[in-house]
Image: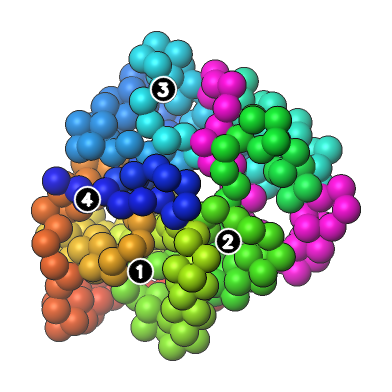
């Protein structure tokens, strides 16, 4: 069974494996319903989506209306100004068919100029506090993407008291000494401040390049169950981290099955063999 742990200071006991709503961006309602049911059957009780993830919010909203919300619901806005973010928030509430979002996240905040707008007068951070006071959202989080993401997340957390953070983390990324050092510094900051730290991109193989795309992920994923097991178990071997599932419904059962069988992280020799055999490579330049 996939383990539960406290999602930072929110008081919610989330499964360590969170359903990544990007997998629902371009599927039918039936496919979305099936994916949600697969996740729930594994005990998943936390779903993460975004206003920019295609039809994900709409499909989730339909499921919620028909079944009643039975999970911790998170979404994101990519807007930096309060005025545009408020429109985005109301749109998410309408699409998700809820009156309150559990976790509202500032999405992919990595550009220094965007930080100044987001945390300045009339910025999205200001609106997030208003929305929390109005009980439209319960908690506020932040996400970042790219090689400088852990550094930028630390800068953002120094400027705002976030409840959660999200960043890419996998075995290949951890072989980059600077990224690993920055990630570890971010993780220590999150532990000190009781901020939930979510990770993504666990099963990345590399960029697609000229190869035909067989999955809906923007990166090429690892696909064999045994290989997925090793990469998922490596992330879950870091006690305290959460893992968001990949953005493809066909990969969802494999990731959840791997998480369900987690007992201990694999040996480094196994992971090095995997990197060599699959020619795994970083996805961030």
Position in image of residue 56 (x %, y %): 49, 31
Q: Residue at x 38, y 31 (%)?
A: 71
Q: How far across and down, in percent of the image, does residue 87 sit?
A: 75, 31
Q: Is residue 118 magenta?
A: yes
Question: Considering the numbered disc 2 on the image, is that residue within a helix, a strand or a loop?
Answer: loop
Q: Are marks 1 and 3 in contact (CB under 8 Å)?
A: no
Q: Earlier in the sequence, mark 4 or mark 3?
A: 4
The quadrant holding residue 34 is: top left
Q: Residue at x 45, y 41 (%)?
A: 48
Compute the Cα span from label 4 to label 3.
21 Å
- Left or right: residue 67 compared with residue 193: left
Residue occupied by mark 2? 144
Q: Position of residue 284 (x, y in %)?
A: 51, 71
Circle 3: element type? loop
Residue 203 falls inside the magenta stretch? no
Please tell me which of labels 1 and 2 falls first in the chain: 2
Q: Position of residue 274 (x, y in %)?
A: 19, 74
Could you tell me how many numbered marks the image carries?
A: 4
**Residue bearing mark 4:** 3
Q: Earlier in the sequence, mark 4 or mark 2?
A: 4
Distance between mark 4 and mark 2 Cα atoms: 25 Å
Residue 102, compared with residue 15, is above or below; it is above
């Amino acid at each position: 069974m996939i383990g539960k742990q406290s999602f930072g200071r929110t008081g919610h006991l989330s499964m360590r494996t969170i359903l990544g709503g990007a997998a629902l961006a371009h599927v039918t309602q039936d496919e979305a319903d099936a994916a949600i049911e697969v996740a729930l059957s594994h005990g998943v009780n936390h779903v993460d989506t975004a206003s920019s993830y295609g039809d994900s919010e709409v499909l989730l909203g339909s499921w919620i209306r028909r079944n009643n919300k039975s999970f911790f619901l998170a979404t994101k806005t990519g807007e930096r100004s309060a005025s545009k973010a408020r429109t985005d928030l109301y749109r998410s509430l309408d699409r998700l068919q809820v009156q309150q979002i559990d976790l509202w996240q500032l999405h992919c905040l990595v550009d220094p100029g965007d930080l100044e707008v987001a945390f300045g007068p009339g910025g999205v951070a200001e609106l997030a506090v208003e929305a929390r006071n109005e009980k439209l959202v319960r908690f506020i989080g932040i996400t970042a993407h790219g090689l400088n993401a852990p550094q930028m997340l630390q800068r953002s957390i120094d400027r705002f008291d976030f409840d959660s953070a999200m960043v890419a983390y996998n075995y290949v990324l951890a072989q980059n000494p600077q990224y690993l050092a920055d990630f570890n510094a971010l993780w220590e900051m999150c532990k000190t401040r009781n901020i939930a730290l979510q990770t993504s991109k666990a099963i990345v193989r590399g960029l697609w390049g000229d190869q035909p795309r067989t999955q809906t992920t923007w990166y090429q994923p690892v696909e064999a169950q045994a290989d997925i097991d090793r990469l998922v178990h490596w992330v879950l071997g870091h006690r305290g981290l959460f893992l968001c599932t990949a953005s493809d419904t066909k990969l969802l059962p494999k990731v959840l099955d791997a998480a369900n069988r987690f007992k201990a992280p694999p040996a480094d020799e196994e992971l090095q063999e995997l990197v060599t055999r699959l020619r795994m490579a970083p996805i961030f330049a």
